[in-house]
Image (spheres, rainbow, N blue to C red):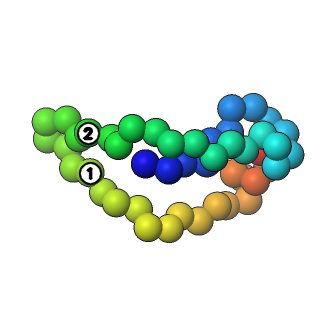
Amino acid sequence: MKAVVMNRTGDVEALAYSKWPDPVPGRGMVLVQIAIAGVNFMDIGMR
């Protein structure tokens, strides 16, 4: 799976594009595919 991760606070340089292993749901769980996600004000403020 593709992800943009933030390992520290800071400007745009704090964001890193990376590949992660596909998640595997456990017993009694489901896996949901997300096509798009929004970013709210608090997410931007934390960055």
Please tell me which of labels 2 and 1 falls first in the chain. 2
* Residue on which disc 1 sits: 31
- For the point 30% across and 57% down, the residue is 32
- Residue 6, numbered circle: none
Q: Is residue 44 left or right of residue 27?
A: right
x and y percent of residue 15 in the render? 72, 44
Circle 1 crowding by C-alpha within 10 Å: few under 14, some 14–19, many from 20: few
Q: Amino acid at mark 2?
A: Val
Task: Kindly report the distance in space between the C-alpha atoms of the residues bearing marks 2 and 1.
Answer: 7 Å
| Residue at 44 percent of width and 67 percent of height | 35
**Vertical arrangement, residue 40 with respect to residue 2, above or below:** below
Q: Residue at x 82, y 43 (%)?
A: 13
Residue 27 placement (x, y as % from top left): 13, 36
Vertical placement of 37 versus 3: above or below? below
Kindly state the secondary structure of the residue where label 2 is placed: loop
Q: Quadrant of the C terminus?
A: top right
Q: Is residue 37 left or right of residue 27?
A: right
User: Who is closer to the viewer here, 36 or 18?
Assistant: 18
Q: How many marks?
A: 2
Which SS class for mark 1?
loop
Please name whichever residue, 46 or 17, is drawn nearer the observer in this view of the structure.
17
Residue 46 seen from this side: no
Residue 23 pos. (x, y %): 33, 41
Q: Are dots 2 and 1 in contact, CB under 8 Å?
A: yes
Residue at position x 14%, y 41% from top?
28
Q: What residue did someone put label 2 on? A: 24
**Residue 34 is drawn in which quadrant?**
bottom left
* Left or right: 35 in relation to 15: left
Q: Is residue 1 above or below residue 41?
A: above
> Label 1 amino acid?
Leu
